[in-house]
Image (cartoon, rainbow, N blue to C red):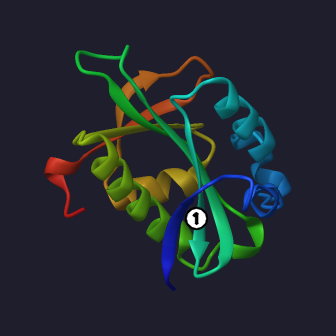
Amino acid sequence: MSLAIKNIDESNREEILKLKVSKSQESFIETIKECLDEASEDSKWRTVGVYDKDTAVGFAMYALFLDEGKNGRVWLDRFLISQEHQGKGYGENGIKLLIKQLYDEYGYKKIYLSVYDINKKAIALYKKIGFDFNGEVDLKGEKVMVINLDNTDN
């Protein structure tokens, strides 16, 4: 496995749009097209593909929200591994790579995400990596999790 994060542009947009989660996971995340459309309307969003060598295996969307908290919050807002690539370690390794990218890009020690409490597999993965619930619930009813990089080996 040789994972890399690549920005999404016209050269890889179509291959990223082909990535799909399983039917049972569709209610947990917006479609990639919806995410790309949202990002095109708001410049704070970053959209990236997760690649194993030259193969797109996943998608993520993140941003720094300066209007949240005292100094703003970095959100890993969307993350998925395409169904045919799930169960191969891409989720854990992709999240770890994204955490590094977000820290390198923004310099914040805390990274936030939100998850539906019925998404047990995602919650288990996030907890394994070091995320914990902080007691908040977002506007869509998802529970907020945060990782503090001062408390991890990342």
Quarter of the image for residue 52 reads bottom right
Asked if residue 87 lies left or right of residue 102, the reply is right
Residue at image coords 56%, 28% = 43
Asked if residue 127 lies left or right of residue 141, the reply is left
Asked if residue 44 lies left or right of residue 128, the reply is right
Q: Nearer the viewer, residue 18 or 112?
A: 18
Q: In x, y percent, where is residue 121? A: 57, 57
Q: In x, y percent, where is residue 152? A: 20, 57
Residue at image coords 57%, 38% = 117
Is label 1 in a helix, a strand or a loop? strand
Residue at image coords 34%, 28% = 73
Quarter of the image for residue 56 reads bottom right
Q: Determine which residue is flagged by label 1.
A: 50
Q: Is residue 22 above or below residue 69?
A: below
Asked if residue 33 lies left or right of residue 67, the reply is right
Three-letter code for the amino acid on which mark 1 is drawn: Val
Q: Quadrant of the C terminus?
A: bottom left
Q: In x, y percent, where is residue 144? A: 44, 32
Q: Nearer the viewer, residue 91 or 34?
A: 34
For label 1, count other residues whose C-alpha is less than 10 Å away and answer few (under 14), some (14-19) or many (20+). Answer: many
